Amino acid sequence: WKLLMEHFGFKYHKGKYCLPGNENKPGKDSCAIEGRHYFSTLMELRKHLCAYGIPKCKKYLAYPDVTAINHWVRFANVKGLPDAAFVNPADVGGYLSFRGAWSMLQKLGLTWCGGFYIVDDPDPLKESKKFENQEDMSVHLARFGIPRIRGSANVGLTDDDRLRLDLYIASAKIDSFKRIDPDKENVNEITPRRSRSKRSSDAAESSKDVENLLQLSPTEPKQALGHREYQMTFNNLETQRQ
């Protein structure tokens, strides 16, 4: 939270965690909306940043801080992971393949039909989301979490299984520092389908954005500002996905 305040301009105002900018603070004449512009808990803010990305950085961040914030945001939807936990994959059954992950997701209510991966909404009145490929489905689940689908079996899924699944999903390639405007995003298809060339282009652009973030200041080492850095990295997870 200190990093978000000092380097991005987040504010704590009237007991709320606010996005950067005075227009995002609650108040009598404010148009800010709770759950969109300000949040009652740090976890609510964290999940919002996981879904929509972090606003533009205003001050230089050292590489360890970039990594720490990225992990803190990306692991927002991982169940059973204590703050600042060290995760040894061997302790929870090792890395998952997509086949293993999909088998677990089916137990949680996800389905395959007509050439699409189907992610039902917990609200039966809302339309299901459809994805043509596993990559886009994984990105959507990484951003918003695996939904609690009514009537799903959830049979034979241990706490360790769920942790392995959530870590697999969280390793989807997403740039946490590229902000998505919630007000402009397509409600019916939150993670739109993209061509292979478009996905490659987006990945290259995301990499460039992070490089620019790291080049805003001198390169001397900088101590972390009291935050806890997650020890589980995405490198091995991404290798296992390939």
Image: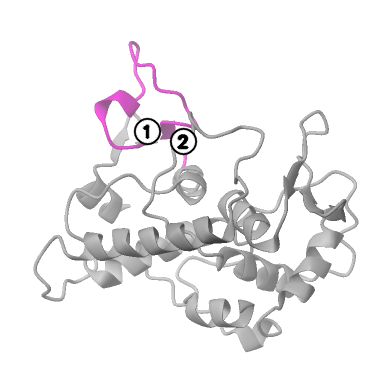
Question: Quick one: label 1, few (<14), some, or many (20+) residues within 10 Å?
Answer: few
The residue to which callout 2 is attached is: 40
Q: Earlier in the sequence, mark 1 or mark 2?
A: 1
- As drawn, the residue found furthest toward the top would be 29
| Residue 229: image location, x then y, percent | 38, 70
Q: In this view, does 182 lie above or below 137?
A: above
Disc 1 and disc 2: Cα gap in Å?
Answer: 7 Å
Q: Given the image, on which type of amino acid does mark 1 rest?
A: Gly
Instruction: Label 2, secondary structure: give it.
Output: loop
Does the rendering let one see residue 225? no
Does the rendering let one see residue 46? yes
Q: Given the image, on which type of amino acid does mark 2 rest?
A: Ser
| Residue 142: image location, x then y, percent | 59, 57
| Residue 45: image location, x then y, percent | 45, 43
| Residue 186: image location, x then y, percent | 58, 33
Residue 89 in which image quadrant: bottom right
Q: Which residue is drawn at 62% across and 49% down?
A: 193
Q: Left or right: 163 with respect to 39? A: right
Q: Nearer the viewer, residue 193 or 58?
A: 193
Magenta segment = 18-41
- Count of marks placed on residues: 2
Residue 127 in which image quadrant: top right
Contact? badges 1 and 2 (CB < 8 Å): yes
- As drawn, the residue found furthest toward the bottom would be 90
Q: Is the magenta stretch mostly helix, strand or loop?
A: loop
Instruction: Label 1, secondary structure: give it.
Output: loop
Q: Is residue 205 magenta?
A: no
The residue to which callout 1 is attached is: 15
Q: How was this image coloured? A: one colour
